[in-house]
Each structure stands twice: as C-alpha cells, then as structure tokens.
Amino acid sequence: MKKAEIHTDKGVMKIEFYENDAPNTVKNFTDLAKKGYYDGLTFHRVITDFVIQGGCPDGTGAGGPGYTIDCELDGDNQYHDRGVLSMAHAGRNTGGSQFFICYNRHNTQHLDRNHTAFGKVFEGLEVIDQIRQGDVMNKVLIIEE
C-alpha cells in the first residue's frame, strides 16, 4: 500500500491513496513525486472553505508535466470530503500534475465524479487550514508499505 507525505513549513500532511479506485492517477502522482517534480512547488491557489491547490510547475495554474491523463470517476471513493486529494483539470481527461486538497464536504460535493479523487489526508488535517497561497511543498515523499 502506497502512502505519501507532503512536507511544508506549516507541517506534514500524510496521505493514503485510493489505489483501487484511481490506480492510474495514483501512479501518475507517485511517479512525479518520486522524480522530485513537486519538491519546491507552491500551493498557487488557496480558496478558504474550498480547496488548496498545487502542482503547477510555473506557479500560475496553467502549467503541467507536458502530458494529460484520463479521469477515473467510477470508483467507490469519488466523494470530495475534508482532506480528499483530487486532480485539478481544465476539462474532462486534461489532468496532469495539478491537484487539490478539500477543506470540507459542504463546498466540494459538486466535484464528485467530475474530478478524480485519488487519496485522503489521514494525519495532518490541521495543516490544510494553515496553508496560504504561495506556501511551498518542500518535499513530497512516497512511502511503499
């Protein structure tokens, strides 16, 4: 079972992946993280009570890894609850490296089965509330158990 840790100056968010529900999305994220792709990138979009978003190499929300991946929307865990990690995209099947983490269920339920939920913060939920626009992901570690 793969897990991840997103290290920031505000603390560490520990993530469990939805490998059964979104295997290709999990593989894409973990492959990028293992290459150090996310290290030093910012949370370029922070909307209180909605999401914190990161993974854009140019920090504007327009960048990506140079390819796109398909959405995976049919799994059991496609619900955007507090702490859920999900793929950002500019339309169906256009995700790449950008992802977001949900603040709560109240303002994110319309994302269900529109964006691929592929993991959830199981420790460090309080860090989500402390992240501000421009905060850096110092390191994203993948842990294989």
Image (cartoon, rainbow, N blue to C red):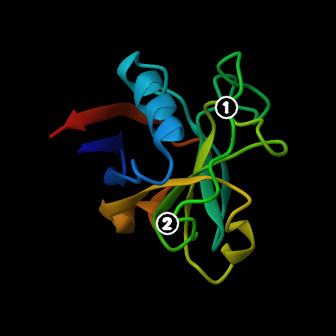
Q: Amino acid at mark 2?
A: Asn
Q: Is residue 9 left or right of residue 73?
A: left
SS for callout 2: loop
Image quadrant where residue 107 sits: bottom right
- For this rendering, which residue is in front, 12 or 145? 145
Judging by the rendered image, the residue that carries numbered circle 1 is: 69
Q: Residue at x 66, y 69 (%)?
A: 50
Residue 112 pos. (x, y %): 67, 68
Q: Which class describes the residues within 10 Å of circle 2: few (<14), some (14-19), or many (20+)?
A: many
SS for callout 1: loop
- For this rendering, which residue is in front, 64 or 130? 64
Which of the two labelled residues, at mark 2 and mark 1, occupies the earlier sequence position? 1
Q: Is residue 35 left or right of residue 70?
A: left
Residue 39 visible, this orientation = no
Q: Amino acid at mark 1?
A: Ile
Residue 32 pos. (x, y %): 47, 23
Judging by the rendered image, the residue that carries numbered circle 2 is: 77
Q: Residue at x 32, y 54 (%)?
A: 16
* Residue that protrudes farthest toward the right in the picture: 91
Residue 83 pos. (x, y %): 45, 65
Q: Residues at badges 2 and 1 in contact (C-beta under 8 Å)?
A: no
Label 2 to label 1, Cα distance in Å?
19 Å
Q: Residue at x 58, y 79 (%)?
A: 105
The N terminus, quarter of image: top left
Vertical side of 140 occupied by 11: above or below: below
Residue 113 visible, this orientation = yes
Image quadrant where residue 43 sits: top right
Vertical side of 17 occupied by 28: above or below: above
Q: Residue at x 70, y 36 (%)?
A: 95
Vertical side of 36 occupied by 50: above or below: below
